[in-house]
Image: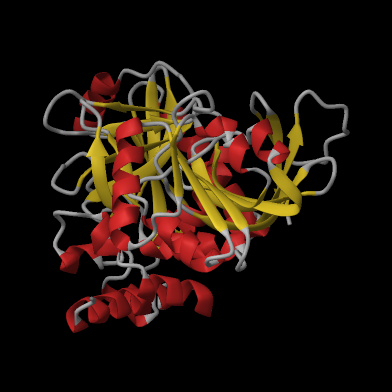
Amino acid sequence: MDSPELSRLRGRMVSQVAASGRPVSDAVAQAMRAVPRHLFLPGTDPELAYRNEPIVTRRSADGEPTSSSSQPTIMAYMLDQLAVAPGQRVLEIGAGTGYNAALLAHLVGAAGAVVTVDLDEDVADQARAHLAVAGYPDVTVVAADGAAGYPPGAPYDRIIATVGVSDLAPAWREQLVPGGRIVVPLDLRGSQRSVTFEWDGASWQSRSVIPCGFMRMRGTLAGPERTRVTEDTRELALTLPDDRDVDIDALAGLLAAAPAAERATRVTAAPTQLFDGLGLWLALHEPRWGVLSEPATGAGLARAPLAVKDHRMTAGVFGADGFAVLARPSAQPAPGPPGSGPAAAGQPPVFELTVLGYGPAGPDLAAELAAQVQAWAMARRPGGSDFSIGGYPRPGTATLPAGAVIERPHTTFVVRPS
């Protein structure tokens, strides 16, 4: 039996989700009010469980997060992208705590069916236990590589991935009904977007695109993205969309020194534009791009343009003899995390971007990165929703449309202005 306090906390969480900037359907809001998230996070104080925040539930031996309960806001957005209806059959890739599968089960009702697949057997076991305790024992939980889907439960009306993917598995198309749809956090060279895809008979075509951030899929469909972290207490992390060999400790040493060059861009932007727009632009146009982050207590990225929870983040270009990153001019105050300060009053902080170059190649890289920022501004600052994405199975003979091309083992993606 639910207590009034738990009902209040769930209601508060749903109100925060609804106020996050995008409409949330009544069906999804009702599911979030009904499903007890705290039961999927045993040992977590309900006050924390019902915050509109992601919660890491498992880490690797080196401290990297491997499983979590995602932020309720992005879960709600993706469920609305999926457009689940009562009676449908749904396949979920990435069981996590089981909470999202419970939301799906609530949406499809007694006449529907939900299957959730996770690579880690212990994660699957815990999700199964959580679902049983929360009152959703009919959800099928499978320990397997999600790239193969789950043929015994096919065909599916909807397929959703709750882990970042860099490719679309052929099995997903084979197990989807005609007219069905899939929603995946798609890795576009390190810049993630939650994409709704439908199959038009020859290719996947996007129906909606929104920014997101998820842990990457492991197993046979794991993408090329790699993160390197310093071995000391600085916890400086560099995420690259490929397997370039960048010495993170040497990079940290350069970052601790004065920059070799500073270039003004004369381009102003808000933090949301950097995440949704400029980051995607760099991913599509700059093969040397990457993302650098450190704890907010660090000193190397004090002028980073993004503050996300307890970390500072910036994007840049990284070469063999130096690197260049986006920054704020030193005379301007740092913007707070999204949702704080002016942003909470509907006035997101805006600042002029500058570029800092480090190492022997720093001046040249700074000039090139500044030129990319200016090109993005000249193109009218496109964000993720301003692009459409086509996925063309490989091998294929179809003539590809114009756009930025990203080759993956099973799919050629083409990203183009919508």
Front one among 324 and 180? 180
Residue 140 relative to residue 147: left or right: left
Q: Quadrant of the N terminus?
A: bottom left
Colour approach in the figure: secondary structure
Q: Residue at x 36, y 31 (%)?
A: 120
> In the rendered image, is residue 383 in sight?
no
Q: Residue at x 62, y 35 (%)?
A: 151
Residue 320 relative to residue 107: left or right: left
Relative to 233, does residue 57 appear above or below in the rendering? below
Q: Residue 106: where, in percent of width, then height?
A: 47, 67
Q: Residue 188: where, in percent of width, then height?
A: 57, 39
Q: Quadrant of the C terminus?
A: bottom right
Relative to 255, does residue 8 appear above or below in the rendering? below
Relative to 201, does residue 394 appear above or below in the rendering? above
Number of disc labels: 0
Q: Residue at x 57, y 46 (%)?
A: 281
Residue 38 relative to residue 353: left or right: left
Q: Residue 193: where, in percent of width, then height?
A: 54, 50
Report which quarter residue 238 is drawn in.
top left
Q: Residue 105: where, in percent of width, then height?
A: 48, 61
Front one among 65 and 142? 142
Relative to 343, does residue 264 appear above or below in the rendering? above
> In the rendered image, is residue 128 in sight?
yes
